[in-house]
Image (cartoon, helix red, strand yellow):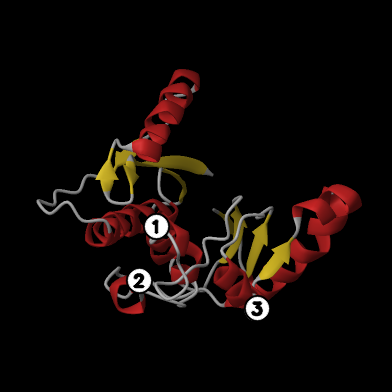
Amino acid sequence: MRMRIIHVPYDSGYKDYRMGRGPRSILRHLKADRNFPVDEVEVHDRFALEVGPSFAVARQIAEKVRHAVSNGAFPLILAGSCISCVGTIAGLGMPSPAIIWLDAHGDFNTPETTISGFFDGMALATAVNRCWGKLAATVPGFRPVPERHVAQVGAHEFDVNERTLLDSSEVHLVDPQRMRRQGLDAELGPLLARIRTLAGRALTFI
């Protein structure tokens, strides 16, 4: 399958800022190795806000992912912000994808549980409709991913209320210490097979 790169140089709605500079660096190395086709997300917003521009970025990601998939290409999204997952999910469409969330942080906070107020720390919670539902619905094609289709792998830094929320959810938590003891294949093999069966389609790694 052909691959199409979707370049998203944004962190929390800000272009080429903090983690938003990472995708361009990765892209330079990929282009040096092979000339992949690239689509770049560009958002013009005169208000220096975090939430609004982040969803504007997600809407563009969704459009570009949808275009890539409809043309038989595999979309590889290089993004500097976890909330970009909303656009990726929307662009993939139905049936709902499964998510393997690889992050040291839970990203399962909501506006009611967050201590820092960091928007990206609510990314996974947004993907499963725990928060920001009305704004996520403004991204064409977005449908929340069922929690039972989600595995969070390797996270070890949680806010107290965030961890309580995760423990009460259907998200599969894979503890990094247990993974070290049991081995990667033993810990992830059965889990991935189960999620793949539940989701009925390919997994999305975020």
Mark seen at residue 170: 3
The residue at 37%/34% (across/down) is 37
> Is residue 25 rendered to the left or right of residue 15?
right
Q: Which residue is mark 1?
A: 118
Residue 31 falls in image quadrant: top left
Instruction: Say few, some or many: other residues with alpha carbon within 10 Å of mark 2 (under 14 / 14 to 19 / 20 or more).
Output: many
User: What secondary structure is marked by label 1?
Assistant: loop
Residue appearing at x 26%, y 56% in the figure: 50
Q: Quadrant of the N terminus?
A: top right
Q: Disc 3 vs disc 1: which is toward the camera?
A: 1
Mark 3 residue element: loop
Which circle, 2 or 1, is nearer the viewer?
A: 1
Circle 2 is placed at which residue position? Answer: 141
Q: Which of disc 3 and disc 2 is earlier in sequence? A: 2
Nearer the observer, 182 or 29: 182
Q: Nearer the viewer, residue 170 or 159?
A: 159
